[in-house]
Image (spheres, rainbow, N blue to C red):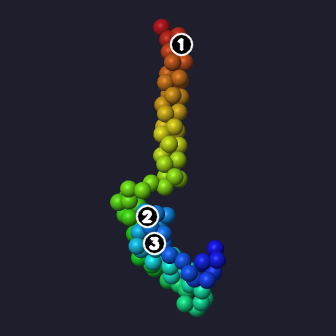
């Protein structure tokens, strides 16, 4: 934390290996000691790293943990839905048919 406060930091190769240059630039522009030199909220929203996120995410081979958890949840939900359909069909088969 002291390195950031003193503006003496860098992107360690191992830790930030998967981080794009655009992301590094974005963070670098936010970690500026002089408040007037930092990016404003408007500038942040216009930064190239935040533009066209869906296209960048689809090209990325790195999956966030939340993405993987969401995929797992959706698969379980789909399986559960099919389970209930089969269970209901089996129960309906037990009812006698009308003559």
Q: Which residue is farthest left?
A: 59
Side (left or right) of 54 relative to 66: left
Residue 94: assigned label: 1
Of marks 1 and 3, which one's residue comes earlier in the chain? 3
In the depicted structure, whether residue 54 falls above or below residue 66: below
Residue 23: assigned label: 3
Q: Residue at x 53, y 84 (%)?
A: 39
Residue 13 coordinates in the image, percent (x, y): 44, 67
Residue 44 at least partly seen: no
Identify the secondary structure beneath mark 3.
helix
Between 23 and 84, the one lying in front of the other is: 23
Find residue 30 and report its image quarter.
Answer: bottom right
Residue 66 coordinates in the image, percent (x, y): 53, 53
Of marks 2 and 3, which one's residue comes earlier in the chain? 2
Q: How many residues crowd mark 1 within 10 Å: few (<14), some (14–19), many (20+)?
A: few
Q: Nearer the viewer, mark 2 or mark 3?
A: 2
In the depicted structure, whether residue 2 falls above or below residue 88: below
Identify the secondary structure beneath mark 1.
helix
Residue receiving disc 2: 17
Residue 91 coordinates in the image, percent (x, y): 54, 18
Residue 25: assigned label: none
Q: Residue at x 49, y 48 (%)?
A: 68
Identify the secondary structure beneath mark 2.
loop
> Does the CB distance between marks 1 and 3 fall below 8 Å?
no
Using the numbered discs, state the Cα–Cα distance from disc 1 to disc 3 in whole angstroms.
Answer: 60 Å
Residue 19 coordinates in the image, percent (x, y): 44, 66
Q: How many residues crowd mark 2 within 10 Å: few (<14), some (14–19), many (20+)?
A: few
């Amino acid at each position: 934390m002291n390195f950031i406060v003193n503006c003496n930091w860098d992107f360690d190769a191992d830790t930030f290996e998967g981080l794009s240059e655009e992301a590094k630039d974005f963070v670098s522009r936010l970690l500026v000691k002089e408040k007037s030199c930092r990016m404003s909220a408007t500038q942040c929203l216009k930064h190239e790293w935040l533009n066209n996120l869906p296209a960048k995410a689809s090209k990325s081979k790195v999956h966030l943990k939340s993405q993987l958890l969401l995929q797992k949840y959706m698969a379980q939900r789909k399986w559960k839905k099919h389970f209930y359909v089969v269970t209901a069909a089996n129960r309906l088969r037990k009812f006698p048919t009308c003559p």
